[in-house]
Image (cartoon, helix red, strand yellow):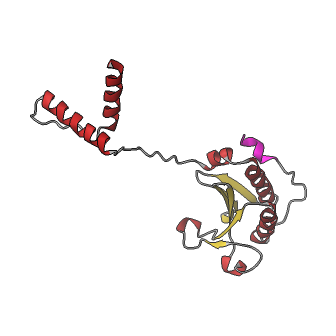
Amino acid sequence: VESEREERNAREEIISPEPEDDDDVGEEAEEHEEVRTVRHIAESGKVRYIIIKYKKSFTAKLIQSADITKQYYSELKNELLSFKGIKNRISWKHETFNVGRRKVAKLSVRGKSLYLYLALDPKKYEGGKYIVEDKSEVASLEGTPLLYKIKNDRRLKYAKELIAEAADGAVKLAGYEALDWAKDYP
């Protein structure tokens, strides 16, 4: 019986709805009011939950993604870096690929899909074989407004074609050796 009381009191303290006030009321009356309020909440069935939302970095999302997503990431990164002059930079939200100061592409992970943002006009590709989205209204994506979601092998193949168009003028390196970037994210 004693342990049940302690457990109930512990639960009531966790569910306590109101912060303690510094009133001129005695300690006994204050405790009595608080317990009554907690019991009222417990009897009415109302329970308060704390919702925690984590902000994950690009690297964390890539680590937690499926092996196939990591493989797609590795192939796309190799494809982008195989062009002369393209450099990459990893930030909190995505990985950016630039030629000098001109953005060519961005890679990000969302759910099970790998998102490829390219510096191409999305209106040119609407209604064709590429299923693209226009993200030009998003301020952070104004340099790379075309969104292409990589979900399967066919989309990966089409993404490589789009990358070749986005890297217009850039020459493919003859001696580029493809690396396994997926092994960096176990």
Residue 174 in the image: x percent, y percent? 90, 59
**Does 31 sit above or below residue 173?**
above
Image quadrant in which you'd find residue 15? top left
Residue drawn at x 85%, y 63% as measured from the top left: 172
* Along the viewing direction, whichever of 177 and 101 lies nearer the viewer: 177
Residue drawn at x 10%, y 33% as measured from the top left: 25
* Along the viewing direction, whichever of 48 and 181 lies nearer the viewer: 48
**Does 181 sit above or below residue 77?**
above
Image quadrant in which you'd find residue 166? bottom right
Residue drawn at x 66%, y 45% as measured from the top left: 64
* Along the viewing direction, whichever of 20 and 138 lies nearer the viewer: 20
Instruction: Look at the image and say whether residue 17 sits in the magenta stretch.
Output: no
In this rendering, the count of numbered labels is 0
Residue 101 in the image: x percent, y percent? 66, 63
Question: Relative to residue 168, is residue 11 drawn left or right?
Answer: left
Residue 144 in the image: x percent, y percent? 64, 68
Q: In which quadrant is the N terminus drawn?
A: top left
Image quadrant in which you'd find residue 28? top left
Furthest toward the top, the residue is 2
Furthest toward the front, the residue is 1
Residue drawn at x 61%, y 51% as measured from the top left: 91
Residue 34 in the image: x percent, y percent? 21, 35
Question: Relative to residue 26, is residue 99 drawn left or right?
Answer: right
Instruction: Look at the image and say whether residue 181 sits in the magenta stretch.
Output: yes
Furthest toward the left, the residue is 24
**Does 123 sit above or below residue 37?**
below
Write the start and end of the magenta stretch as one range: 180-186
Question: Relative to residue 79, is residue 7 drawn left or right?
Answer: left
* Along the viewing direction, whichever of 90 and 137 lies nearer the viewer: 137
Q: In which quadrant is the C terminus drawn?
A: top right
